[in-house]
Image (cartoon, rainbow, N blue to C red):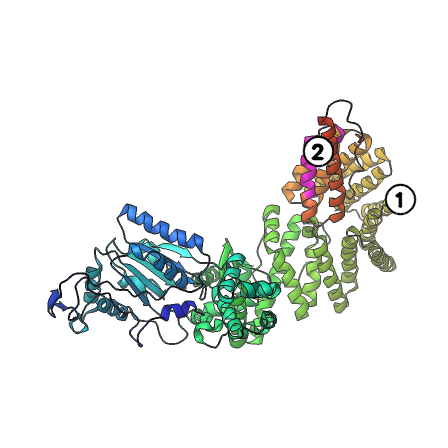
Amino acid sequence: METEEQANGRDRGPAGADVRNEVSAPVTGHVVQAGVVHGGVHLHSGREPSVVPQQLPAAPRGFTGRAGELAALTAALDGVAEAGATVMISALSGVGGIGKTWLALHWAHRHVDRFPDGRLFVDLRGFTPVGEPMPAAEAVRGFLSALGVDPAGMPADFDAQVGLYRSLVAGRRLLIVLDNARDTTHVTPLLPGDPACTVLVTSRRRLAGLVAAHGARPLDLDVLPAAEARQLLVAHLGDARVAAEPEAVDAFLECCGGLPLALSIVAARATAHPGFPLAALAEELRDHATRLDELDAGEIPLNLRAAFSSSYHALSPEAAVLLGLVALAPGPDIGLHATASLAGLPAARTRVLLRELETAHLVSQPSPGRHRLHDLIRLYASEQAHAHQTQDSRDDALRRLVDFYLHTAYAGDQVLDPHRESVAPAPPVRGCRPQTLPDETRALAWLDAEHPCLMGAQRLAVERRWHRAVWQLAPTLHTYHWRRGLLTQQIDVASDGLAAARQLGDEAAQALAHRLLAEACALTGRHAEALERLHQVLALAERTDDLPSQAHTHRVLAWAWGQQGETRPALDHAIRSLALFQALDDEEWEARGLNQSAWFSAQLGHHEQARAYCEKGLLLHRRHGNRNGEALSLGVHAYLGLCTGRYAEVLEHGRRALGLLRDIGNTYHEALLLHGIGQAHAALGQHGQAREAWEQALELYRIQHRSGEARSLQLQLDELAGRSREDARGPGTAGSVPESPHRPPDGLPHE
């Protein structure tokens, strides 16, 4: 079993002789005497002036994948050869254990024919868990020795040594591999000045200086894709053993996250016990708490902690602290402003520290402003945070982060729906810097990007028993969850919110939490639970003479009954809710009550009453600038057109509503509206347009896990396809499928 570090060290001499490996035999019949051959410098006695160094360690065993990176290196060499102007330098970078040295050596051995004048190699030890980096002066002297210069006659001055080195390699087709460099200054003296040479540099850092000042071509290495990671295990363990235990191998792949060193450690441990089942090792790796303990094969080159520690200890103290805090943060990634609150630092300073971490390949930036940790680096960094930061400092940081998510989400909710029932959070803790979200577009974009982190923040708050934050996140995320059709997530958030409100002993909070949960339950088929919760809340609201709570509870009861097809009681509750909002002189919620009453009136066939409700609601929504309410009023108008056979009105109102819904990101109602628009097209015999609308609706239903609606619509699409086939056969064969549309979709005007 050979790791990146082992490959670096193979075929070396004793300590201090890393670059003084064997040289080739003379290539001409001349023997230079021990005398002056270059500016007063002595060559080794008996050596030719045209020494051909062969310093490459052996090619790595079991190398797999990296076809794109190998092709990029070759293309870079070919491009420089055609131009013939500058030395070709490729800078391979990536986290420790990613396989930089393996890639460099594999490529070098495949192209030895292109470097007939020799191959130089040095491990600069820029990142090592033991010892110090090799000074550039030592590396230069090693190269001079490999090129035939007698140590006794080397210039004493470092600059003179560098000049001699560059003179000796000038005009020669040499490959120079500078492995494990600390930074750009570490390798600059070792760069040749002649375009005949090719240089490969590997480092755990992005060597921006090498790119800017020397035209190096950067090549960042990422983790191996699953197929290549599996093939690496096959190369070490054999096809039969890998095929015999697929579940264990899948666990290896998941736990190692595509990191070649981690996979090699697992393979080394499995190879040490060929009679043991792989499942036993897989079980040990599954435990997050001890995973890094298991990724240790007993030697430093095969110890993942040791590999990460070299990069970690090279960080500035401030960046090391930040890495540990980011590892503690919930969610799959983290944004700049969230990180700033986590650290309690200004955004500008946080950006600088994140750049340091990214340069060191300890965090990645998959999209602008969002940073992510590899799972194994997260485990290591979390260990460092627990070892070097106090419990209070960690708790304070996480509290700032939770407050950041809560307050920024609340700001977004107020932009999306300023009249929604909401709970203003207490001022954020010191050091927390919430973002401002000035418009709906940016509010939705932020919520889309941060939603997994928001869910993680609430789970973290549950674990820490921060009950008020847990409860307040439930109403704060309500509007966003409805607009995106994330009903299951709303149930989770509302359930945790209700439990937290109970812990707080806050009856008003419990009433709202019950309503939020019941609303989500009603639209996900949990009808009995929804009604039970709502009747409890209504009884409390009536007992305390809480008119706003009564109005909202009747509103949600209307939806709960409507979802069960019980339109008569649904309309009764809608009208009672409307009357209460009117009594409260709340025009915004009156408008929503008008939409709801119009919807259920239309379902009962009271079309004129429905139209009157709808027109008044549309006016109020426009007066208050509620584009979501306006869209739903237009949607009710479209529904009335379906009910009365006025399909042109359906398309007119439906298209206007669709534009508004798309502008505000309401994909939940967009799906329903597309469903209805498709029905109008089908009724008009416009099968292609019907199919287009229905296919868009079907995709949204599936994304939102609305399986019942998706099944119903799929049947309509199948029926439409059959009708189209009949039509294609010509007159007299069609007509087996009725032309009237199916029952319009339910639930459109829900607000």
In the drawing, does residue 596 fall left or right of residue 129?
right
Question: Looking at the picture, how far across and down is residue 669, in whole percent?
Answer: 71, 43
Mark 2 or mark 1, which has the lower sequence index?
A: 1
In the drawing, does residue 705 fall left or right of residue 165?
right
Question: Which region is colored magenta?
Answer: 682-698
- Amino acid, disc 1: Arg
Say which element carries label 1: helix
Q: CA distance from mark 2 to mark 1?
A: 31 Å
Q: Quadrant of residue 590?
A: top right
Say which element carries label 2: helix
- Amino acid, disc 2: Ala
Q: Is residue 426 visible?
A: no
Q: Is residue 696 magenta?
A: yes
Of badges 2 and 1, the one in the foreground is 2
Q: Is residue 102 magenta?
A: no
Residue placed under numbered mark 1 in the picture: 568
Residue placed under numbered mark 2 in the picture: 690
